[in-house]
Image: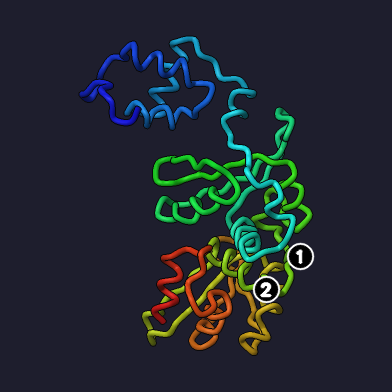
Amino acid sequence: MGSGNWGHGKYRGWTRRENQFVRNNYDKMLYADLGRRIQRSERAVAVHAHKLGLRTTPEIVSSKITSVTDEAFFDKWSPESAYVFGFLAADGNLWKEKSHKQGSRVQMALHQKDKEILDKFVERIGRRIHKDRDMIRWIFRSKRIYNKLVDLGLHERKTHSLTWPKIPKRVLPDFLRGYSDGDGCFCILTRGHRPCWSVNGTKKFLESLSLQISPIVNHKYPCYKSRRQTYVIILHGKNAIKIGKFMYGKCKPYFCLTRKWEVWNGF
């Protein structure tokens, strides 16, 4: 329906066409998606749907959350599954729902500037991302994937309790690149113009990470407590470049955040 003739002006009444569109789709689309189609805010659609007597139940809300297209995505390790798993370890959320037969959700929220990577996740695993002001959310429901992620080492409310998961060495570069894209940073230090790579996480996770990368950089790096009440590891100079080469290889991988790859590629 796009930009059809829905009416104009700061305030406008609801047309019959809009009312019919909301009635036909309120149980299939999120209010934010409905609003974009008819050029109204999410809140305006929610309030008007209530006035029309349209009630959303837990079942209707659940049906709007996208099911996955590849339930077996994490069953076998590949560069893609390791990258996505790393990103989820850094920036994802798991939680169970008693009100739904699948009972398990996976979610990630990123700034709109990183929409490119969520589009790739949707392409491989799910079918929808949701815009929320300057953020975008990727949500899917799958009991099989939820249980697999838990088996591999993820869990609910992991911010201060994540430990090193079960990662084969052959996909360690991809996992580390995904985790770094979720909670790491490449930069050039103002003082001395030295390359720098830093990554955040729990103390136990970073201590294990330090052991994993020590053969690459020939040094075991300590982790320090950060202002966010988590911990951080920081590599400078040649070792920051080494870790970048380990994660990215000789050319830009398909699964990576372009803005972070460009910073590293400029070292």
- Residue in the picture at 44% in, 46% down: 135
- Residue in the picture at 48% in, 21% down: 25
Give the label on residue 61, or none. Answer: none
Residue 192: horizontal and vertical position, in percent?
39, 87
- Residue in the picture at 68% in, 42% down: 95
From this view, report whether residue 78 is shown above or below residue 31.
below
Mark 2 residue type:
Leu
Left or right, 205 with respect to 135, comes to: right
Q: Give the foreground label among 1 and 2.
A: 1
Q: Which residue was labeled with disc 2?
A: 209
Q: Secondary structure at mark 1?
A: loop
Residue 88: horizontal and vertical position, in percent?
62, 55
From this view, report whether residue 254 is shown above or below residue 192.
above
Please tell me in which quadrant of the rendered image residue 199 appears. bottom right
Say which quadrant the N terminus sits in: top left
- Residue in the picture at 58% in, 34% down: 65
Residue farthest to the right? 151
**Image marks 1 and 2: residues in contact by CB distance under 8 Å:** no
Residue farthest to the left? 9
Q: CA distance from mark 1 to mark 2?
A: 12 Å
| Neighbourhood count class around disc 1 (C-alpha, 10 Å): few under 14, some 14–19, many 20 upward | few
Q: Which residue was labeled with disc 1?
A: 166
| Neighbourhood count class around disc 2 (C-alpha, 10 Å): few under 14, some 14–19, many 20 upward | many
From this view, report whether residue 46 is shown above or below residue 221.
above
From this view, report whether residue 230 is shown above or below residue 19.
below
Say which quadrant the C terminus sits in: bottom left
Residue 208: horizontal and vertical position, in percent?
72, 73
Q: Secondary structure at mark 2?
A: helix
Please tell me in which quadrant of the rendered image residue 39 appears. top left
Residue sitting nearer the eye, 182 or 248: 248
Mark 1 residue type:
Lys
The mark nearer the N terminus, 1 or 2, is 1
